[in-house]
Image: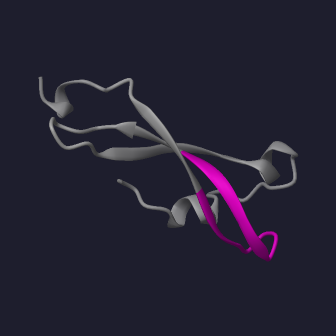
Amino acid sequence: MKGGDFMSNTFIKKRISDFCPKYNTKISISVKYQDISDEPTAHYQKIGYRCDKNACGGCNAKPCPVYENCSEII
């Protein structure tokens, strides 16, 4: 099967740090990537994130500028 024929259940999480204009400081978020590769080379596409500020109900920035600035595919 080729990568386009199915969605893999392989995920990785990567911690990304960048400047957040909402809080006017550098923050980090956990970005979730899903395997979209054809063997043998692995490629992962971002599919979501978790921001500690958002978990506290303090951030409502849509879209998250830190998430938007991180790599779409790694």
Q: Where is residue 17 drawn, in percent x and y? A: 63, 65
Q: Residue furthest left?
A: 1
Q: Where is residue 24 drawn, in percent x and y? A: 80, 77
Q: Nearer the viewer, residue 60 or 30?
A: 30
Q: Is residue 2 above or below residue 43?
A: above
Q: Residue at x 87, y 46 (%)?
A: 57
Identify the coloring: one colour
Q: Where is residue 65 drawn, in percent x and y? A: 62, 66
Q: Quadrant of residue 71?
A: bottom left
Give the extent of the magenta segment: 16-31
| Side (left or right) of 10 relative to 41 | right
| Side (left or right) of 49 relative to 34 | right
Q: Quadrant of the C terminus?
A: bottom left
| Side (left or right) of 55 relative to 48 | right
Q: Nearer the viewer, residue 8 or 15?
A: 15
Most frequent secondary structure within the magenta stretch: strand
Q: Residue at x 72, y 59 (%)?
A: 61
Q: Is residue 15 above or below residue 6?
A: below
Q: Residue at x 81, y 43 (%)?
A: 55
Q: Residue at x 18, y 26 (%)?
A: 5
Q: Nearer the viewer, residue 70 or 63?
A: 70
Q: Nearer the viewer, residue 16 or 21?
A: 16
Q: Is residue 23 above or below residue 72?
A: below
**Does residue 19 belong to the magenta stretch?**
yes
Q: Quadrant of the N terminus?
A: top left
Q: Quadrant of residue 39?
A: top left
Q: Quadrant of residue 2?
A: top left
| Side (left or right) of 17 relative to 40 | right
Q: Is residue 18 above or below residue 51?
A: below
**Does residue 22 belong to the magenta stretch?**
yes
Q: Where is residue 60 drawn, in percent x and y? A: 77, 54
User: How many circles with numbers are drawn on the protein?
Assistant: 0
